[in-house]
Image (cartoon, rainbow, N blue to C red):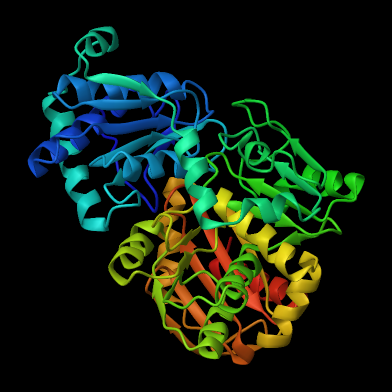
Amino acid sequence: MDALQIRFGTDGWRGIIADDFTFDNVRACAQGIATYQLQLETHGAPIVVGYDTRFASEDFANAVAEVLAGNGLEVLLCVGPNPTPIVSFTVVNEKAPAGIIITASHNPAQWNGLKYRTYYGGSPPPEVLAAIEGHIARLRESKTVRHLMLSDARSRGLVRNIDPRAPYLRHLSSNIELQRLQHSGLSVVVDAMHGAGAGIYAALLAGSKGNFREIRAERNPAFPGMQNPEPIAVNLGRLSQAVLEEGADIGLALDGDADRLGAVDENGTFVTPLQVFALLIYYLLEVRGLRGMIVKSLTTTSMTWHLAERYGVPVRETPVGFKYIAPVLVDEDALIGGEESGGYAFRGHLPERDGILSGLYLLDLMAITGKRLSELIQDLYKLVGPHHYSRLDIPLQREGQQVIRARMDSARPDTIAGYSVLSQDCVDGYRFHLEGGGWVLIRASGTEPLLRIYAESESPESVQDILKAAQRMMGV
């Protein structure tokens, strides 16, 4: 077979459709997972298989189901496109040993991918993914992929359809008072970004006293009008416009598989994921009075440390990716976990990003306090000081990646954008801690051929200065 190495990055394996992401490679992935599950001897319960709204996702999911069935494993095949958090919840709800989701999350339209979820509904630790990768590599060499035609698998009872939405929606009602949201009078615009999260908020907020509008709710694998289905500022112009047109209190956006959340305030201004994470921490600690560990990726906000100190809770910092965050959430019964990309997880729900519940919690914060999002951010800054953030994504050609890596390895600046470098670390990429509490991190994306540069500082202007200085330092 070809020389492609299938690697599970920060959240699954992704590739270009019909180039890397082919039916042969997807079947090889499924066989590797099947082999791993059979070795665990946890194959008494069915494995959950779901998919998103991307091109041919249902066909790839069917191929996965056929391979699992060909290995004698039972499958619960989700009906229709479903968000990753719903599929992950179904793993837990059905007491399944694992779940597989065909999705490339926020990647551009030409991509698709495969996520693997372990029995607790979250990303498995790196050593599990390494074991699966080893199986996949060996199987692709030997071409020993077993499969059973879907019609035969159904007739033998190995593959059964399941509609996972209703149990998930009932579970959410145990985490939040939906009636309070429905009676709050909040006016909400939701941007589904043509992804799998379409219709979920409409079902949850049915009968709401406030105005509700959903945009980009129809399935469209081309994801028109956006660079990619990622809820970041550059892709949310339509949401900002809709919020202003409706006079809405807030705009919420879900990425392609609805495990990430984006937000704009009543002025149509983008609220960064770092601000959202800090607000969610504040909501749980101050408004709801809960306590527990906070788990953060190293790319997310330093406001975490200030809030943790104020409320007397511990913080655990991890490399980028929920494959690092999820095990800590499970082992430590942590209160909340979050990362820079807009993914947040909560105790009592799943050790997994859930953009849907994250948005509900943000609405609940507004409903309880009676404050708008811009006001809540100002309240937050009164507690921890102003923190502003942005990120640069720079495309990289494969032949240039080694050059950039060498530059990162040799970078030892004394100052960046006029700020003294107080210290640096290389836990995941290269992070420089700056005077005044700011920081900048340079790392290669784990899911796309991109160099990412992240910065947080005291003002929007200083953030841009730091990003530009780091970009010059990398010569890109």
At x 70%, y 54%, the residue is: 181
Q: How many marks?
A: 0
Q: Where's the N terminus, which quadrant? A: top left
| Observer-nearest of 416 and 201 | 201
Residue 352 screen position, x and y as percent: 42, 54
Residue 56 screen position, x and y as percent: 47, 20
| Observer-nearest of 188 and 127 | 188
Residue 8 screen position, x and y as percent: 32, 46
At x 62%, y 45%, the residue is: 254
Q: Where's the C terminus, which quadrant? A: bottom right
Q: Does 67 appear above or below 282?
A: above
Q: Evaluate whether residue 398 shows in this view.
A: yes
At x 32%, y 33%, the residue is: 48
| Observer-nearest of 468 and 95 | 95
Q: Residue 14, located in which quarter of the rendered image? A: top left
Residue 189 screen position, x and y as percent: 77, 45
Q: Is residue 209 left or right of residue 82?
A: right
Q: Does 54 appear above or below 377?
A: above
